[in-house]
Image (cartoon, rainbow, N blue to C red):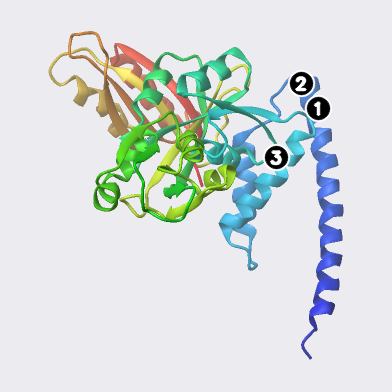
Amino acid sequence: MARTLPELRVLIDAVDQELLSLLTRRAALAHEVGEIKKVEGSAVFRPEREAQVISNLQQANQGALKSESVAVIWREIMSACRALEAPQRVAYLGPKGTFSEEAALRFFGSSITHVPCANFDEVFHAATAGSAEFGVIPVENSTEGVVTRSLDLLLNSPLHIVGEISLLVRHHLLRNTASLDGIEVVLAHPQALAQCQQWLTTHLPDAERRAVSSNAEGARLAAGNPAWAGIASERAGSEFGLHIASHAIQDEAFNRTRFVVVCLPSVLPAPGASGKDCTSLVVSVPNKPGAVHDMLVPLKAHGVSMTRFESRPARSGQWEYYFYIDLQGHPSQPAVAAALKDLSSLCAFYKVLGTYPLAD
């Protein structure tokens, strides 16, 4: 005989009480761990440990929950437990409602202290000066490629990368009404304007495209002028009380942006191996024939896969370049360690930007 709705609600209430009791026990254990870490002077946040916990739970999951739901739920649980010691102060491109804020929440969970910044330079300054422990910055987009300012800042910063997040980015046209009529100005970050240029040319050919510091800032400005519209997330629309005049206007349906988490090594040393890691570095080689080819030989010789290779001008006036490289693996693995050693001996400039667990 099928159970009635009231009966099911009673059962759900009982399970909720069990869950609360178990979460309270988990929080108490996490607090004990935190006390031990204080004595040892070790970091409260360990991204490789949290990645392993989530991976193990996803592999053990045989129920109705989706794997991504397991990750979201446990990240929030761990975030709440970490906050019992001290919430992480996280800097990101603001104001509230940006994709950078969403990336920060996706990585750390919602139990953080928000440090919204006006631009990427301020994010790096906040994490370097100590007003934030961590910074979250975009580094590449599947439509527009690398975020050049982020790469330039990573080159000279004392911060290193300790994590990454990949977001499916859906851009919505936001304004005070749900109509496209009468829009004179469209405001967004330059990357968002570029990612939506075909749609804008087709549907709003006469509207001025005005670049601002962030998509959420564009949404905030659009809230104050009925002839303006912003390109931003649904979260930003809710934050500033705007309607969605048109949904998902990005030119590429599966538009993704990759963010990285940065901090000082004194805040968090390089994470240990999680079993699914990335090592990022920036190098330059002497300007001579075959130098770039020679630089890649150690990777092949030791069987290390390269997943990204980008070049940026060195601004020396000599047509020299820095090369940003992502490698699959962790320096604790013998093959990766050997490849890095051989590669560094060939470089005029060599810097490991970070080693960290890959995004889900």
Relative to 323, 222 lies left or right: right
What's the residue type where badge 3 is placed?
Ser
| Left or right: residue 294 compared with residue 174 | left
- State the residue at coordinates (65%, 54%): 57
Q: Earlier in the sequence, mark 2 or mark 3?
A: 2
234 versus 103 height, above or below? below
Q: For the N terminus, give its image quadrant.
A: bottom right
Q: Position of residue 154 (x, y in %)?
A: 42, 20
Task: Evaluate whether residue 274 shows in this view.
Answer: no
| Disc 2 to disc 1, C-alpha distance | 6 Å
Residue that mark 1 sits on: 36
Q: What's the CA distance linking mark 1 and mark 3?
A: 18 Å
What secondary structure is found at the residue carrying circle 2?
helix
Q: Amino acid at mark 2?
A: Glu
* 313 or 205, nearer to the observer: 205
Residue 340 to residue 181: above or below: above
Q: Nearer the viewer, mark 1 or mark 3?
A: 3
Q: What's the residue type where badge 1 is placed?
A: Ile
Residue 9 at least partly seen: yes
**Residue 80 at x, y percent in the picture:** 74, 41
Mark 1 Cα-neighbour bin, 10 Å: few <14, some 14–19, many ≥20: few
Label annotation for residue 79: 3
- Residue 180 percent coordinates (x, y): 37, 53
Mark 3 crowd level (few <14, some 14–19, many ≥20, 10 Å Cα): many
Using the image, tell me which numbered label, if any, was put on residue 40. Answer: 2
Q: Position of residue 297 (x, y in %)?
A: 25, 28
Residues tagged 1 and 3 counted as in contact (Cβ below 8 A): no
